[in-house]
Image (tube, rainbow, N blue to C red):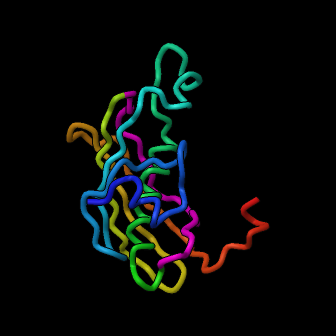
């Protein structure tokens, strides 16, 4: 199992945008399972939506993408690279995610060639599906320091 500090050793995301609490299963370059505990103090809740807080769908997709990045970047040949979105397909939201929910995430990488890949991700809360997506990613070998400013 990987905790948040170990996850930070693989992907560059940091608070408040690190959307993984732990990784419970990892097969480098192939798959990963993890969780995100939706903190009711999340900075998005006051505005999404006042009086009816819902964890934004785009952040659910981002959590899956971060888990996929852990899976692909933990592979020896990709360590130290940066994984970026290249596309999204077949995104479906099934249920709302509320403050205090514990999202179970699963990603399987089914195509990875060179610096491009595709994975399928699913998310559940209490065993019920909340969303699914096909994630496309590109890997950058070197990050220009001017691009990150």
Front residue of this view, candidates 33 and 9: 9
93 magenta-colored: yes
Q: Quadrant of residue 129?
A: top left
Q: Determine the residue positioned at 36% across, 44% down.
A: 36
| Image quarter of the C terminus | bottom right
Front residue of this view, candidates 105 and 90: 105
Q: Determine the residue positioned at 54% across, 81% down.
A: 115
43 up-or-down from 2: above or below: above
Percent of width and height locating residue 2: 31, 59
Please state if 47 lies on the left or on the right of 99 as rendered: right
Front residue of this view, candidates 145 and 50: 145
Percent of width and height locating residue 17: 54, 46
Q: Determine the residue positioned at 48% across, 40% down.
A: 57
Please state if 116 lies on the left or on the right of 38 as rendered: right
Percent of width and height locating residue 140: 61, 76
| Image quarter of the N terminus | bottom left
Q: Which residues are magenta?
A: 79-99
114 up-or-down from 81: above or below: below
Please state if 143 lies on the left or on the right of 136 as rendered: right
Q: Determine the residue positioned at 28% across, 44% down.
A: 124
Percent of width and height locating residue 37: 35, 39
Q: In the image as oriented, which residue stretches furthest toward the left?
A: 127
Please state if 48 lies on the left or on the right of 122 as rendered: right
46 magenta-colored: no
């Amino acid at each position: 199992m990987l905790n948040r500090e170990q996850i930070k050793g693989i992907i560059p995301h940091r608070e408040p945008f690190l959307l993984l609490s732990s990784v419970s299963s990892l097969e480098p370059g192939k798959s990963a399972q993890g969780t995100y505990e939706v903190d009711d103090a999340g900075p998005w809740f006051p505005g999404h939506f006042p009086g009816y807080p819902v964890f934004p769908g785009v952040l659910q997709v981002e959590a899956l993408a971060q888990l996929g990045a852990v899976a692909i970047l933990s592979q020896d040949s990709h360590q130290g690279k940066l994984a970026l979105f290249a596309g999204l397909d077949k995104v479906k939201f099934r249920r709302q995610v509320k403050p205090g929910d514990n999202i179970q995430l699963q990603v399987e990488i089914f195509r990875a060639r060179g610096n491009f890949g595709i994975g399928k991700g699913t998310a559940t809360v209490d065993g019920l599906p909340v969303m699914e997506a096909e994630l496309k990613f590109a890997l950058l070998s070197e990050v220009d320091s001017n691009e990150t400013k």
